[in-house]
Image (cartoon, helix red, strand yellow):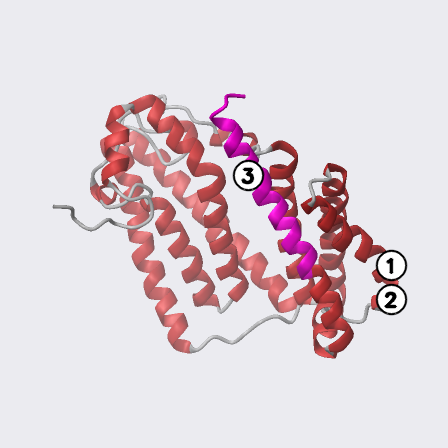
Amino acid sequence: MTSVNKPKKRLRIFHGRMYFALQALAGAAWWLGISTIPALQTATLGGIDPLLIAFVDIPLFVIASALAALDLRWAVWIATGWTVLVAFGMVIYATATTEAGLGAVLMVLAAVGSVLFGALVLLGRIPSEWILIGPFAFHSSNTRVRSHLLLRTTIQVVIFWGVFLIIVPVIINAFEDRWNLSYKFPILLAVAGFALLAFSSVIGVWSARTIANFGSGTPLPAQMAHHLVSRGPYAFVRNPMAVAGLAQGVSMGLLIGSWLVVVYALIGSLLWNWLIRPHEEADLLERFGEEYREYAGRVGCWWPRLARS
C-alpha cells in the first residue's frame, strides 16, 4: 500500500469505529428507553419479553459494538453477525405476528450499517468491486448500430424500472402494511408524486436515449458508451439517470403512500453514490482521460452548477 493511501485507510477505519460507537450508544439508549417507555417497547419488540433477549443482546450488540469502536477486530464479527441474525429474526417475527414492525426496520438498517462499516474496520475499505460482475461489469458496447442500441436501451429501461420502481416498492409497501407501519399521506403528496414521477421519467428516458445517440452505448455498465457523453441532460449534471432514479423512487413512495419506499430510494441513492460511482468515474477517467477530467471539473455530479464568470 502506498503512503498516500495509508492516511485514507486510517480515516476509513476511524469512520467505521465511530459508527460502532454510535451503534453502541443507540443500543444502550434503546434498552434504557424500552425500560421506561412502554410504547417504545411495544413498537420495537411487540409481545417479546425483553428479559428473554437482554442477557444475549446487551453483550453481543451493545458491548460488542463498543469493543469494535475500540478497534477490537473480533468484536466486529460478533456485533455484525448478531445484528444480521436479529434483523432476520425480527423480519420473520413482524411478518408472522404483525407486531414490532418498527423494530424490524431498525434492525435491518443496523444490519446494513454493521456490514458496511464493519468492512471499513476490518479491511479499511468496502469491497464494492464485488458488485461489478456480469451485466454490472464495465465494458464498452459491442455494437454501434443506433437502432440496436436504442432497442437494448429500451429493454434495459423497462426491466430496471419494472424491478426497482414497481416490484421492489410493491414488496416494501406490502411489508409496511403487514407490519402496521402505514401512514396515510395527504392527497396533495400523491399528486406531487405523480407529477415528479412523470418529470423524472422524462429525464430518465432522455438520458438513456442520449447515451445511445451520442455515446454509442447503453445505460447498462456492460454496454457502456464508446464516447464521453456531455450533451442533453449530461450538459447539466454528470449523472442525470441517477438523479432521475432518485426522484422516481421518492415519487413512487409519495404516489403509493409509502414512507418506507421513500427511505428505500434515499438509501439506494446513497449506496450508489458511495459504492458504485467511484468505480464508474475511475473507469471514465481511464478511458477518456483529460476529456473527462475537464468535463467533471465543469459539470456537477448531482446538482447543476451556477455559471462561472
7 to 3, vertically: above or below: below
Foreground tag (3 vs 1): 3
Q: In the image, residue 309 lies at what x, y percent?
A: 11, 46
Q: Residues within 10 Å of mark 2 (few under 14, many from 20)?
A: few
Residue at (75% x, 77% y) in the render: 36
For mark 2, what is the residue?
51
Q: In the image, residue 14 lies at what x, y percent?
A: 58, 42
Q: What type is the residue that disc 3 sits on?
A: Arg
Q: In the image, residue 127 lies at what x, y percent?
A: 57, 32
Say if the magenta span includes residue 13. yes
- N-term mark: 3 or 2: 3
For mark 1, what is the residue?
55
| Marks 2 and 1, how far apart at CA | 7 Å
Q: Quadrant of the N terminus?
A: top right
Say if the magenta span includes residue 8. yes
Residue 221, picture quadrant: top left
Residue 12's disc number: 3
Q: Is residue 13 left or right of residue 29?
A: left
Find out whether the residues at labels 2 and 1 contact each other: C-beta distance under 8 Å: yes
Per the rendered image, the range of residues in magenta is: 1-26
Q: Is residue 165 left or right of residue 85?
A: left
Secondary structure of the residue carrying tag 2 is helix
Q: What type is the residue that disc 2 sits on?
A: Leu
Secondary structure of the residue carrying tag 3 is helix
Residue 220 or 100: which is nearer the viewer?
100
Residue at (35% x, 51% y) in the render: 244
168 to 143, vertically: above or below: below
69 to 248, vertically: above or below: above
Return the residue found at the far left: 309
| Marks 3 and 1, how far apart at CA | 32 Å
Q: What type is the residue that disc 1 sits on?
A: Phe
